[in-house]
Amino acid sequence: MLILGAGFAGLELATRLSESADDLRITLVDRSETFYFGYSKLDVLFGRKTRDEVVLHYGDISKPGVEFRQEQVTSIEPESRRVTTDQQSYEADILVVALGADYDYAATPGFEAAGFEYYSLAGAERMRDALPEFESGRILIGILGHPYKCPPAPFEGALLLHDYLVQRGIRAAAEIRVIGPMSAPVPITKGVSESILDALATREIEYVGTEHITRLDAGSNEVQLESGRSLPYDLFVGIPVHRVPEVVRASGLAPEGWIPVERTNLATRFPDVYAIGDVAGAPTAKAGVFAESAAAVVADDIVARLRGNAPPPPWEGAGSCYIEFGGGAVGKVQANFLGGPQPTAELIGPSPELAAEKAAFGATRRARWFGS
Ligand SMILES: Cc1cc2nc3c(=O)[nH]c(=O)nc-3n(C[C@H](O)[C@H](O)[C@H](O)COP(=O)(O)OP(=O)(O)OC[C@H]3O[C@@H](n4cnc5c(N)ncnc54)[C@H](O)[C@@H]3O)c2cc1C
């Protein structure tokens, strides 16, 4: 059994299978030496933690039946479940692709040269180092494509930037604006979108929806929009265009952008090949909590098949995403994409109690996956 990618999805799947099937030999492959939670980038961006404080080492994984290998996947042949890495080849009985989403910086001309981002750890560090130089002007947070990871994260970034500028005593000298292709911050739910828009408005942050940024013009400090308009900025922060990793694109697994999967059990059209997490074209948001719940269903599906048992109940695409509102308060968006006729989501909080709950969320995963 081969799992490609040791992010939220791969780590949870390996852990579940190790717990429930002691006769399985699981190889977990990732090119990195370390894992970090998506939201840790906000901790690094605002100087609350260093890189060393947020990374977890795959070398610490010690689970019966699980072997971690640090290798770069270079090709995937889904029909034969043959996988090649920079070090060897595998023929898997069961293959699970959990390689996440990559960022396509070049899809937005001018972005790499003139913009900042906090969707990668390196980007968060670079922006952290640049922020002290900002004294006044227009901050534009641009969502450059859809879908993207963690739908509330651009708004979370705006709310935390507001706090940061207030603390420095320069908020009145700055404008903050978020611009994106969606009509509302979280389009599946009017209520949650309105709560986020209210939180933005209270802090004099504007959301400009249904606009697509085509490029940045560093000479004039403007972004060009598909609608023909342009918008000025002094500091541009982009949420990059997301894509499947190149090795997945080249495999033919994702002919229309993301890997199509059965919504009940995340199976692909290739026998004994599943896709979970951000890489899958599932009708949910791209977030760790949904990657984790998908991993749970796939683990149950694999074990049921191995034992000849009935398949598990269908995946509901349910989970809670935390969103920092600043001032130490955290809200929780509880979503269920597939359990009913329509996706549902509601916002709980924000409150300081939910900040503690978010910390516990990270701590339990850290203990469960890394034993620390
Ligand atoms: C700023 C920010 C805040 C966020 N906040 C939250 C939050 O509060 N809650 C939440 O649930 N989610 C949050 N997310 C989203 C969350 O981080 C992702 O949705 C989640 O990590 C997806 O899990 P995954 O396993 O699909 O992919 P990843 O966690 O991205 O894992 C994919 C793995 O595949 C590996 N890989 C890729 N290509 C190769 C290759 N060729 N060879 C070998 N290995 C490879 C990568 O190294 C990586 O470890 C946030 C994201 C960001 C950016």
Image (tube, grey):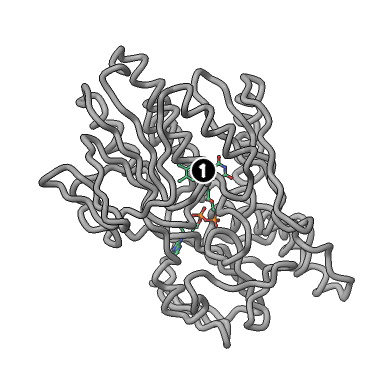
* Residue beneath disc 1: 185
As rendered, which of 229 and 41 lies closer to the eye?
Answer: 229
Left/right of residue 343 with respect to residue 141 in the rendered view: right
At 34% from the left and 60% from the top, the residue drawn is: 104
At 70% from the left and 67% from the top, the residue drawn is: 263
Left/right of residue 331 with respect to residue 59 in the rendered view: right
**Label 1 is placed on what type of residue?**
Pro
Return the x and y of residue 101 as percentages of the image width and height: 46, 60
As rendered, which of 200 and 97 lies closer to the eye?
Answer: 200
At 51% from the left and 50% from the top, the residue drawn is: 58
Name of the residue lying farthest toward the left: 219
Left/right of residue 231 with respect to residue 293 in the rendered view: left
Return the x and y of residue 206 as percentages of the image width and height: 40, 33
As rendered, which of 292 and 87 lies closer to the eye?
Answer: 292
Specify the quadrant that holds the N terminus.
bottom right
Above or below, comparing residue 184 to residue 263 in the picture? above
